[in-house]
Image: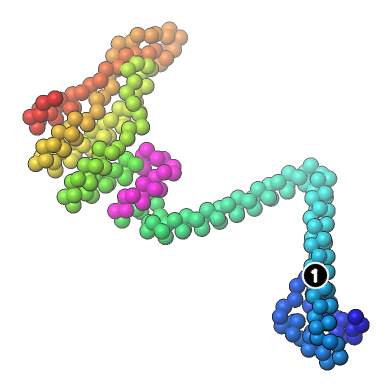
Amino acid sequence: MQLSEDLKGLVESSIADGKISSKERKVILKRALSEGHDQDEFEIYLDSLVQTAKSENKTVRKNSLLSFIKWIGQKKRRVIIAFFILSGILQLVVSISNAAYQDDIASERGCDSVDDCITKYKFEEARAYAEYGFVNKNLRTIIKSEVTYYTSQKELDIAFRSIMEYTFQSGFEPQGRNYINESYNSEAQWYNSLVENVLVDFETDETNLKKLIYSIKPIAKIGDSYKKDEDCINCNEYKFEEDNSKKTELMKRYNLKL
């Protein structure tokens, strides 16, 4: 199709990026009609030019990328630099995506961290955040706050359930090195303290009072050494006994029997 130089220049400048806006199309079509071109025929011709320009742009971009990759691969130093640049970009994208995700989660839950949820008494939401990071420490903080809150509100059933549903992360070891039960003892002492602090609120509920006291955990007490290592004192192994003195004390205090 023969076009005037003006119309040809207008078309080429409009489709240079492989696409044409509705406004540009309208201007070009008006100019073509004024020069006597058939509208349908010219629109078909214009669409073909747009598709050709689009294909050429894709080819140019592909060839440019391949040339760039080839240029980078020519020297080891360029490869290393490119690696660090791409790694930085990827980390930035991941960081931005994660921040957006966390914002959505916070908006949905109504709080943005374990501590924030606790201050708003959103304990289930706090548990959801506790799945990440220092899980056991976070759960203890949540449960202690939850029990304190619900006992203060006289909602003892919820406080009782929160205590009894606690799952220990450590277990009593009957033998091992002198530090083998440190984690267990720390957890047992925390749990026993939690229980003991709420017993006064359950004094009129004998059934649950008994259950709470019976749930008190023994403390591991180091006993005799049964395996010595002459070359490593800290490597000696010992037998451990279960010290139930705390449970016994509380049972006597509340006149309970096994």
Q: Quadrant of the C terminus?
A: top left
Mark 1 is on which residue type? Gln
- Which quadrant of the rendered structure holds the N terminus? bottom right
Dividing the picture into quadrants, the one containing residue 141 is top left
Q: Where is residue 136 in the image (x, y as percent from the top left)?
A: 37, 38
Say whether residue 24 is visible.
yes
Indicate whether 122 appears above or below 161. Answer: below
Based on the displayed image, in which of its 4 quarters is residue 180 positioned?
A: top left
Span shown in magenta: 121-138
Q: Does the image show residue 115?
A: no
Q: Is residue 132 rendered magenta in the image? A: yes
Q: Main secondary structure of the magenta part?
A: helix
Residue 70 lies, in percent from the top left, at 82, 49
What residue do we see at 75% from left, 76% from top?
20
Residue for point 73% across, 47% down? 81
Location of residue 39 by image quarter: bottom right
Residue displayed at 81% across by 45% down: 73
Q: Taking 208 as reference, is 238 left or right?
A: right
Q: Which residue lies furthest to the left in this view?
A: 255
Asked whether 193 or 1 is in front, the reply is: 1
Residue at 72 percent of width and 78 percent of height = 21
